[in-house]
Image (spheres, rainbow, N blue to C red):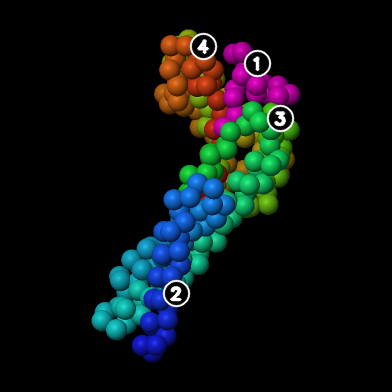
Amino acid sequence: MSKIKLASALGLSAVLTLSACDELQDPNNPNRNAQSGALIGAAAGAALGTVIGNDDRQRQNVALGAVLGTAVGAAVGSNLDRQEAELRQQMGPDTQIVNTGEQLIVTMPQDILFAVDSAQLSGGLRSDLTTLAASLNRYPNSVINVIGHTDNTGSAGYNQDLSARRAQAVSAVLINAGVNPQRIRSIGRGEDAPIASNLTPEGRSLNRRVEITITPTG
């Protein structure tokens, strides 16, 4: 690689990285995760480049790794932003969606999904699950964890079993809607991961939930 091409490659990566840094702080920026992905990809690509080769060859690898990593990271982040926007538009208000920049976390309250002490899905939010399945099929390059949570009412063992059966019930709906079962893992967390106090009815209601994490694989 000539010095001119090397400088151009480094310059492109630097421009993209600086641009992303300037805008990542804006919570209203719809491309924030694409830019975050570009930053992560550039750093990872550059780090990989340093492992291969020495001196001039190493500098070339750093430049190429940074540029390629920027492009791949930006593409992954852009898909995540786009999928988030579509889900927010298509799913109902009872479903919460959080975009961490590395994955989407879709949270559904168990009180609507299931009757008390039951792992049989009710009608509530079932349409949201089929909408989610359609989205997962449109964006196939991801893995999905379906995680059941409970409050601390009852024994820990019972809550663990109930949360696992509820996670499996949600996974079954996604699979029946066409999502590849090899992408999905069902996990029961029982009462181990509360997000609110179990000392109040409101807090216990928040803790009874199913979280579906969507993590891009590239």
Q: Earlier in the sequence, mark 1 or mark 2?
A: 2
- C-alpha distance separating marks 1 and 4: 16 Å
Q: Position of residue 176 (x, y in %)?
A: 71, 38
Q: Which residue is mark 4?
A: 201
Q: Position of residue 185 (x, y in %)?
A: 54, 39
Residue contact at pointers 1 and 3, CB within 8 angstroms = no
Looking at the picture, which amino acid does disc 1 mark? Ala
Note whether residue 199 is visible.
Answer: yes
Looking at the picture, which amino acid does disc 4 mark? Pro
Residue at disc 3, secondary structure: helix
Note whether residue 175 is visible.
Answer: no
- C-alpha distance separating marks 1 and 3: 13 Å
Q: Which residue is mark 1?
A: 115
Looking at the picture, which amino acid does disc 3 mark? Arg
Residue at disc 2, secondary structure: helix
Q: Earlier in the sequence, mark 1 or mark 4?
A: 1
Give the quarter of the image for residue 7.
bottom left
- C-alpha distance separating marks 2 and 3: 46 Å
- C-alpha distance separating marks 4 and 2: 54 Å
Q: Which residue is mark 2?
A: 12
Magenta segment boundaries in residue numbering: 107-124
Secondary structure mostly taken by the magenta-highlighted segment of the chain: loop
Looking at the picture, which amino acid does disc 2 mark? Leu
Residue at disc 4, secondary structure: helix
Q: Earlier in the sequence, mark 1 or mark 3?
A: 1
The nearer-to-camera label among 4 and 3 is 4
The nearer-to-camera label among 1 and 4 is 4
10 Å neighbourhood of mark 4: few (<14), some, or many (≥20)? few
Q: Quadrant of the N terminus?
A: bottom left
Whether the magenta-drawn stretch holds residue 195 is answered as no
